[in-house]
Image: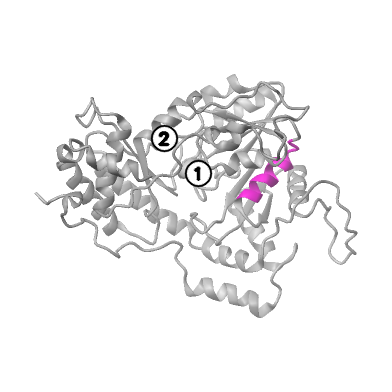
Amino acid sequence: MSQLAIEGGSRTVPEGIEKSWPIITQADKDAVMRVLDRGQIWGPDAPEKTALEQEWAAYVGTKHCLVTNSGTSALHACVAGIGVEPGDEVIIPAFTFWATAQAVVCQNAIPVFVDIDPITYNIDPKKIEEKITARTKAIIVVHVHGLPCDMDEINAIARKHGLKVLEDAAHAHGAYYKGRKPGNLGDMGMFSLNATKNLSGGEGGLVTTSNPEFYEGARLMCMFGEKQVPKGNIRPYDAFIMGNNYRPVEMTCAFTRSQLTRLEAYNAQRIANSELLTRELSQLPGVITPHVPADRNHVYHIYRVKLDPAAAGYPDIDREDFRWAVQHALFAEGVPAMEWHSFPVPGQKIFQNKNAYGKGCPWSCQFASQDIRYDANDYPETQKMFAASFVLYTIHAANGLELMQHYVKAFHKVYDQLDRVVTNPAYYQRVRASV
């Protein structure tokens, strides 16, 4: 039996085998150079921006698309687009990147958090209605890691209470739910074009909707609060709302359009990589791989592995200690087992202090409820998920099945010697002390 790397043995995954994301081709470089040769590098009606908006709307199946300079700005544009105002409450999952909540706070509105489903890691529809009040304006769903949420159930709740549904689809480019794509499953959707995402633009965002009023509201937020001026007319420089400059640059749009031609192929490789991992790792006792309901797919922006120490034969070991021990051993073997956040968003300081802008705003606003409280312990499923799991980022299309096989071998090596990994607490105590 091979000696564990944490005990001085050789690592399983060869060094330097992993490739970086995104894949940049000559076609991508040519697309950016065409912009520079053209000389028009920005503009509300610039050709690359306009083309990307048309192409993404057609791909998702909506009437409108708006390109922005980041996924965060796209999400804020959605929140503004549906008319969220000071004191309004917006329901979001406790497990997400905090920008989902930030977009709400940017409108002087109040995020209200809901725990996750322990199997899908998405917002739990069964726990939404108990958080709805007279101030609730919308629900933001997050298709976390690339798996679409339970949209039929969520949309039914929204209709019952007269709420809008926004989709944070930053991880879910090209996924589908019952034959429809994220970005076209609620009232508005947003996507991130950050370099790490399935569709990369380096940085940028996409807003989608079929509602012309919501589209115009989002466009106002992205263009200094100014109304659209027909091409050829004089700009009056007259702001109607408090807007921002969320406009993209043409190089980003051109690069994204080039990447979009390969999105389906790239997602297919992500899925193949992830399905190999699921097929192999699910055979190990106590290893819980991503669950994918039959009515949707998963595009695996991130691959999450959860561990059950009892099922692995160690019922007396704390699940977080067990996870740290296994994760540390895998990392030493060359598997980049990492965290993607480590506690519920409402546990972050901004919510604990309830102070975003000074003087307690927006929570101290006269229009806001004074009964809002944030306690990370109110989201037990989110906490359990963090304690027991880690993620793999390197399942993207730049890497193939050969690397996944190395990961599988590393898991088997660690699990074949679990007694040595978990019975020496120095392993996980050392790594936990370093974070």
Left or right of 61 on screen, residue 5: left
The magenta region covers: 72-84
Residue assigned mark 2: 293
Q: Are marks 1 and 2 in contact (CB under 8 Å)?
A: no
Task: Tell me what residue is drawn at x 28 percent, y 58 percent.
Answer: 403
Binning the other alpha carbons within 10 Å of mark 1 as few (below 14), some (14 to 19) or many (20 upward) gives many
Residue nearest the viewer, comparing 210 with 282: 282
Could you tell me how far apart the alpha carbons at marks 1 and 2 are, in whole angstroms?
Answer: 11 Å
Check the picture and name the quadrant holding the C terminus: top left
Is 77 in the magenta?
A: yes
Residue under the image location 43 percent in, 27 percent down: 381
The correct choice, above or below, for 353 with respect to 252 in the image is: above
Picture quadrant of residue 119? top left
Image location (x, y in percent) of residue 370: 70, 22
* Residue found 64% across the figure and 22% down from its top: 132
Residue under label 1? 176
Horizontal and vertical percent for residue 117? Answer: 45, 29
Q: Amino acid at mark 2?
A: Pro
